Image (cartoon, rainbow, N blue to C red):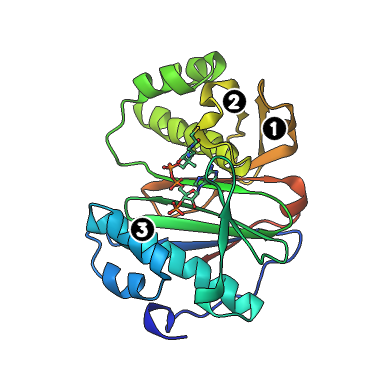
Amino acid sequence: MEGPLAALSIPPPPDSGQVLILITELDPAGNGWQEHSRELPANEQERTHSYRYAADRFRFAKCRLLLRGVTACWQGISTQEVAFRHGKNGKPFLVQSLGLQFNISHTRGCAVLALCHDHEIGIDIENTGRRTDIDGVAGKVFTRREREMLMQLHKNEKRRHFFRLWTAKESLMKATGRGFSLNPSSIEAFLPEKPHIPGSFTCQNLPSANVLQAREIPVPSGYQAMLCAPAAVLVKSPLIITV
Ligand SMILES: CC(C)(COP(=O)(O)OP(=O)(O)OC[C@H]1O[C@@H](n2cnc3c(N)ncnc32)[C@H](O)[C@@H]1OP(=O)(O)O)[C@@H](O)C(=O)NCCC(=O)NCCS
């Protein structure tokens, strides 16, 4: 492989009962977006250029190239041959997937790419250092039980739990492909304090939410990430690789 992917050592594809998660740093200044964009097909180069800020251009181009590089290698095709289709609410899927599913999330400074076989998954990462009106957002997107639980916590704990709940809900919205068309306040997340114990969901608009689990993903300090997947792909703990 040439270009920015040349130094990448491609991991083997995930086992059937496991999710593979790739964590990658993003340059907040967006330096180097041109080199990444150059390796993408014309429509994705166009999309890269459509972002106003270099940081967003870099983030899109780097994540797309990483996804293309890894899945092309597993399927024995070129990065340019990897093709996508989109679900009703914009969730991207691989066309020649051989059952491979993925989801991407990015925030200032870091991105995560989750891959598995045969089951739709969702992942969300947030930069926990960013300015956030915790009470204001919680009032709009959390359930009453979630808000009451947050209100009992002191400042730092409150912030930590806010981001745990928020990333869990968004990971569910992304696993189902519904995104924000699914009202986050209709989702209730039950997250055990111990991060290795899976969390669960109920959602009044989506009864099947109760088959999905939330798994906290260890990411660098200053970030919070959550994966949402059915138990069938969480038989083994997710395999996490920094690239
Ligand atoms: C999906 C969504 C929740 C992402 O939120 P976000 O915090 O801005 O972004 P994240 O970094 O976590 O995720 C973005 C990535 O998720 C993926 N994605 C896009 N739409 C998605 C969806 N509906 N479900 C799951 N994943 C989706 C994409 O890969 C996207 O990255 P890319 O554009 O660089 O390829 C939000 O954009 C959304 O709700 N989109 C749907 C919009 C919609 O409903 N449109 C129809 C109008 S009725």
Q: In the image, is residue 139 above or below residue 80?
A: above
What residue is at 51 percent from the left and 80 percent from the top? 9
Q: In the image, is residue 113 above or below residue 154?
A: below
- Residue kind at label 3, given as amino acid type: Arg
- Which label was assigned to residue 187? 2
- Which label was assigned to residue 209? 1
**Residue to which mark 3 is pinned:** 47
Q: In the image, is residue 214 above or below residue 240?
A: above
- Label 2: element kind: strand
Q: In the image, is residue 155 above or below residue 175?
A: above
Q: Give how far apart the Cα atoms at labels 2 and 3 are.
A: 32 Å
Kindly indicate the quadrant of the structure image that contains residue 60: bottom left
- Label 3: element kind: helix
The label nearer to you, 3 versus 1, is 3
Residue 184 left/right relative to 100:
left
Q: Are marks 1 and 2 in contact (CB under 8 Å)?
A: yes
- Point out the tag, 3 or 1, that comes first from the N-terminus: 3
Residue 166 left/right relative to 95:
left
What residue is at 42 percent from the left and 56 percent from the top? 111
**Can residue 150 be seen by looking at this rendering?**
yes
